[in-house]
Image (tube, grey):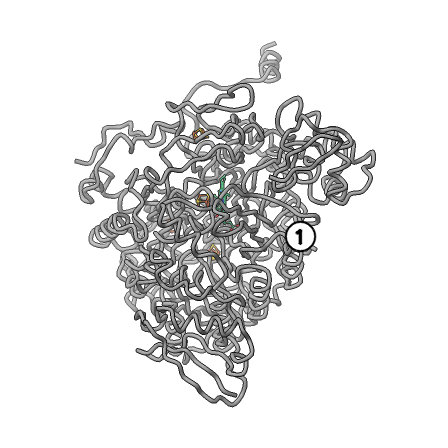
């Protein structure tokens, strides 16, 4: 029966973390993927971080192999980070190389700390979701392959986080990351009258943000094509509202998001490529776009500047000019919160 | 689509056993669904919840928010879950003959 | 004991191995073994595509490493479905990054669903969503199939990650056992909110799955219009920045709100995120319907002796002072001062230089209304209270405020309206009034520019009285 809540700390937290609970004083990164934390008592704790299969899909076979490594190298404990990479905590420093090699044999690269490309976050996409306009896991895989070397080595001015979602619901994030990829639908919801008749019509009408949905007597609805912004909201509460068209679905690219308060503070990413077509299995245009933005950032940013910081220094004018990405009216926000991104002064970058 | 014969009427159900045409609902139908759910004979307290949900649905066309159910019936949320172990949405709404309340995750 | 190994012919990496005696008697293992021998495989170690795995027979003394034994899928992938059956998926196994397809292939997930999705550029899954079974009001999602000819739909079960997202191998193995017994044999470790998801559970086995997860110490929940799993940062367990005990706070959350987590009742989902300091490792300030972030009020402290050493070892203080967002730092090459009035306690200098540490007078800020979609698209949560004392063990002040916020939301919001959209609709002034928190200067980037205020009759009455 549910209703028990969280297990006691001792059940899963390794003794080294319990012993030094709240008494950590320092940490340093020995090399990408290897961290050393030092506690008040002087005790040092070595952590090895590794990338995990895209989309955090882990077969029980791999999970058991990882458990085997954790027994061998980390006193039977492991940890998953907020970006779903693997951490073995409390590793004997003399055995880090051996562990790195063993992880590599499992196919898991060690890296992803400091100024590197981090583990991607993605949603389930076409593996398991009804709304997906694009396949987030495959896009994540294509991008991760492209930037693989940067996971292993610190080549960047600051860290680089990339998140991918199959649709605007953003279960896999996107707007939160330095670079986000977000699946977009562009077709109108198809209304299946018999199905809609069995749904809660007032709810369908009320979830639409633009009032594009009107009841159609006796028991259905109609969608105003002028108003629909393809937000997928109406598809969630009713089976009869179907959105998605393989010929027009695709994805958008956003850049410059960031979470922490350090430096410029938290911000959402901004849409720089409104639409790219789906090209499974490896989405070459997307990979190329990411590559172009990353290369430029690496070349031009100052130390500690995340992509968003770099762009706010050089300005969007320069960003579009240097990346060669076209600017169109799709970049101007016309939705309810539009004044937030429209410029008012005449302090331009030329 | 599964169907059941009941009092000479054929009722379509969806894959979760929800009534497809709410117009066919009656109190005996409600008792039939309650049996399906393994609730046994519906008590007055069950009826209080079922009638409240049904009346709200007939008036507004949507299932009531759970807060509304709690407020109007005076039952605590957990008690409603005890009355209808599959919950107000899947249990009580089904018995009240509402379409399946949806909404992802 | 005789072991049969299938290894990469190029680098010799053992891809699967079986006990010879089991291979003779166990039909499923035989099937899997035959399948692997025929199939093209990508070696996870040297990453070469091999057409034929090398078979080796080795004698070992003790029981071999348990995890290397083929204990993945109990049902073998169908023989004859060679590499050509899923060419697009196979393509996703290429390249150096560990692939989700390689994982899916080792399980009972119906890969053809995914392959068709990639081929048709369209998801093959149908309408699904929140569902419940008697006794389990939250924690189950239904995934329906739009292609019953390939695969039936199934359910997934969500469980809360343990504290600090640490797992003992015992817990992890128990989780694997549940996934093997009842699901496809695949785990989502983790889903975005740091829930564990066990995928592919048939309806009849939901109850058993839930009970076994709970027995393993992993309680279920986090679906439906309820408080969701709450994410905390690693904080006291391995981070020197920690200002408030995020781990204890999450435990207090589950102690106090377990019913709100497991019995859905709100207008829409509510996601909590707790970060121990403004670095906000849980990204609460982007995604939290309720974001709780550790803050400090005294200015950062400087350890002079340590600073000297750090600079002597090549630390670039000039760079840090230049990058401080408020230019609060003054560095003349020897002495560092921080202008307490300019500093916004952003953590940048603290992250970069170990001689600078957060100041005292610590508590949390409570923000509300973050989300990634909903009516008005992505919204960052807004500050409701800039400083609330965070007092263990129950963090009463913090969670009282949270409960008040969600009560107001529950009382006034429309169905399927997220907290952020509700705040946007009512206005932050009205929302704060309903919650009963006083306005503070920390809540605004600047005061309002438009002159259209609302005055209540009581306020007018007060002025009239004064005039008399
Ligand atoms: C059938 C439909 C959907 C499926 C299968 C789905 C799946 C998921 C999954 C697997 C996660 C990770 C959850 C976790 O770790 O607990 C997630 C998170 C999320 N979902 Fe969905 N989702 C669906 C619909 C929606 C809708 C309609 C919305 C918007 C209202 C939404 C917004 C989100 C957001 C913003 C997150 C990330 C939350 C966070 O990181 O804290 N999803 N979803
Ligand atoms: S972001 Fe969209 S496609 Fe991805 S899991 Fe969420 S609803 Fe599905
Ligand atoms: S997709 Fe969004 S905007 Fe379009 S009709 Fe549906 S709810 Fe309205
Ligand atoms: S949010 Fe702060 S306290 Fe928590 S883990 Fe991150 S840096 Fe450490
Ligand atoms: S905490 Fe931030 S604002 Fe304050 S001195 Fe350091 S870098 Fe500057």
Q: How many marks?
A: 1
Classify mark 1: residues with Cα within 10 Å, few (<14), some (14-19) or many (20+).
some
Whether residue A129 is situated above or below residue B30 in the rendered picture? below
From the viewer's side, name the closer residue of A276 and B25. B25
Q: Is residue A121 above or below residue C405?
A: below
Q: Position of residue C190 (x, y in %)?
A: 49, 57
State whether residue A264 appears in this view.
no
Q: Position of residue B97 (x, y in %)?
A: 68, 32
Residue C195 found in image quarter: bottom right
Q: Is residue A152 left or right of residue C36?
A: left
Residue B50 at x, y percent in the picture: 74, 32
Q: Residue furthest front?
A: B8
Q: From where the camera sits, is residue B87 visible? A: yes
Foreground pick, C253 / B1:
B1
Residue A8 quadrant: bottom right
* Residue at the top extreme of this rendering: C468
The quarter of the image holding the C terminus of chain C is top right
* Residue at x-position 41% and y-position 22%: A224
C18 to the left or right of C171: left
Q: Considering only vertical position in the picture, is C430 above or below A305? A: above
Which residue was labeled with disc 1? C255
Q: Chain of mark 1?
A: C
Q: Nearer the viewer, residue A8 or A42?
A: A8
Closer to the camera in the image, C64 or C227: C64
Could you say where residue B49 lies in the image, as x and y percent from the top left? Answer: 75, 33
**Mark 1 near ligand 1 (CB under 8 Å)?**
no
Q: Mark 1 falls on what kind of element? A: helix
């Amino acid at each position: 029966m549910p209703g028990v809540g969280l297990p006691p700390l001792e059940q899963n937290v390794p003794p080294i973390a319990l012993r030094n609970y709240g008494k950590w004083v320092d940490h340093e990164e020995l090399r990408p993927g290897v961290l050393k934390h030092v506690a008040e008592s002087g005790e040092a704790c070595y952590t090895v971080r590794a990338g995990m299969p895209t989309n955090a899909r882990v077969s029980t076979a791999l999970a058991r192999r990882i458990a085997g490594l954790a027994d061998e190298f980390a006193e039977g404990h492991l940890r998953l980070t907020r970006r779903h990479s693997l951490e073995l905590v409390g590793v004997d420093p003399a055995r880090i190389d051996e562990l790195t090699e063993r992880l590599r044999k499992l196919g898991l690269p060690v890296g992803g700390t400091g100024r590197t490309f981090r583990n991607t976050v993605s949603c389930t996409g076409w593996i398991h979701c009804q709304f997906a306009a694009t396949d987030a896991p495959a896009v994540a895989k294509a991008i991760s392959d492209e930037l693989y070397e940067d996971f292993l080595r610190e080549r960047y001015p600051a860290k680089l986080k990339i998140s991918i979602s199959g649709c605007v619901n953003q279960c896999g994030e996107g707007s939160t990351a330095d670079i986000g990829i977000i699946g977009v639908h562009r077709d109108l919801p198809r209304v299946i009258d018999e199905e809609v008749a069995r749904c809660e019509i007032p709810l369908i009408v009320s979830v639409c943000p633009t009032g594009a949905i009107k009841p159609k007597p006796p028991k259905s609805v109609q969608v105003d094509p002028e108003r629909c912004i393809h937000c997928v909201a109406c598809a969630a509460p009713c089976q009869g509202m179907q959105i998605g068209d393989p010929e027009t679905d695709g994805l958008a690219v956003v850049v410059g998001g960031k979470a922490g308060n350090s430096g410029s503070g938290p911000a959402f990413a901004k849409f720089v490529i409104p639409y790219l077509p789906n090209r499974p299995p490896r989405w070459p245009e997307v990979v190329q776009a990411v590559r172009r933005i990353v290369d430029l950032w690496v070349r031009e940013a100052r130390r500690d500047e995340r992509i968003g910081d770099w762009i706010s220094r050089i300005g969007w004018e320069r960003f579009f000019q240097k990346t060669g990405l076209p600017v169109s009216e799709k970049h101007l926000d016309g939705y309810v919160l539009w004044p937030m991104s429209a410029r008012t002064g005449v302090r331009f970058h030329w | 689509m599964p169907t059941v014969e009941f009092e000479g009427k054929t009722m379509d159900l969806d894959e979760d056993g929800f009534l497809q045409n709410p117009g066919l609902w009656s109190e005996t139908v409600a008792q039939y669904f309650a049996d399906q759910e393994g609730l046994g004979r519906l008590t007055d307290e069950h009826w209080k919840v079922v009638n409240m949900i049904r009346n709200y649905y007939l008036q507004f066309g949507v299932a009531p928010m759970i807060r509304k159910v709690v407020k109007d019936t005076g039952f605590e949320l957990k008690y409603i879950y005890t009355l209808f172990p599959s919950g107000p949405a899947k249990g009580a709404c089904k018995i009240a003959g509402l379409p399946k309340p949806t909404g992802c995750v | 004991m005789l072991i049969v190994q299938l290894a990469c012919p190029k680098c010799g990496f053992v891809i699967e191995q079986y006990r010879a005696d089991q291979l003779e008697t166990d039909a499923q293992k035989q099937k899997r073994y035959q399948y692997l021998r025929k199939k093209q495989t990508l070696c996870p170690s040297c990453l070469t595509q091999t057409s034929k795995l090398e078979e080796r027979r080795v004698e070992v003394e003790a029981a071999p490493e348990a995890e290397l034994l083929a204990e993945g899928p109990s049902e073998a992938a169908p023989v004859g479905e060679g590499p050509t059956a899923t060419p697009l998926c196979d393509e996703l196994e290429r390249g150096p990054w560990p692939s989700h397809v390689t994982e899916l292939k080792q399980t009972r997930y119906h890969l053809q669903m995914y392959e068709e999705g990639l081929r048709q550029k369209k998801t093959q899954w149908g309408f699904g969503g929140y569902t419940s079974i008697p006794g389990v009001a939250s924690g189950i999602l239904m995934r329906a199939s739009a292609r019953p000819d390939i695969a039936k739909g199934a359910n997934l079960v969500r469980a809360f990650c343990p504290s600090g997202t640490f797992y003992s191998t015992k817990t992890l193995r128990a989780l694997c056992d549940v996934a093997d017994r009842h699901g496809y044999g695949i785990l989502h470790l983790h889903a975005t909110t740091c829930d564990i998801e066990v995928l592919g559970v048939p309806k009849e086995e939901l109850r058993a799955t839930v009970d076994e997860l709970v027995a393993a110490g992993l309680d279920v929940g986090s679906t439906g219009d309820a408080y969701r799993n709450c994410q905390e940062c690693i904080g006291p367990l391995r981070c020197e920045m920690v200002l408030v005990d995020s781990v204890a706070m999450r435990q207090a959350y589950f102690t106090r709100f377990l019913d709100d987590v497991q019995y859905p009742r709100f207008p829409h989902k509510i996601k909590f995120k707790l970060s121990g300091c403004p670095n906000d490792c849980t990204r609460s300030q982007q995604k939290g319907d309720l974001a709780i972030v550790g803050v400090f009020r005294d200015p950062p402290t400087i350890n002079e002796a340590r600073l000297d050493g750090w600079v002597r070892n090549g630390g670039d203080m000039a760079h840090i002072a230049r990058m401080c967002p408020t230019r609060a730092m003054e560095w003349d090459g020897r002495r560092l001062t921080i202008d307490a009035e300019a500093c916004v306690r952003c953590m940048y200098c603290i992250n970069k230089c170990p001689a600078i540490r957060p100041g005292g007078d610590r508590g949390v800020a409570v923000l509300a209304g973050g989300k990634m979609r909903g009516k008005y698209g992505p919204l960052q949560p807004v500050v409701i209270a800039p400083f609330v004392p965070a007092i263990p063990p129950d963090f009463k002040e913090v969670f009282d405020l949270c409960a008040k916020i969600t009560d107001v939301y529950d009382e006034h919001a429309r169905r399927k309206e997220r907290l952020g959209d509700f705040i946007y609709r009512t206005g932050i002034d009205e929302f704060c009034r309903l919650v009963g928190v006083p306005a503070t200067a920390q809540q605004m980037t600047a005061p309002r520019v438009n002159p259209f205020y609302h005055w209540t009759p009581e306020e007018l009455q007060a002025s009239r009285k004064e005039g008399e």
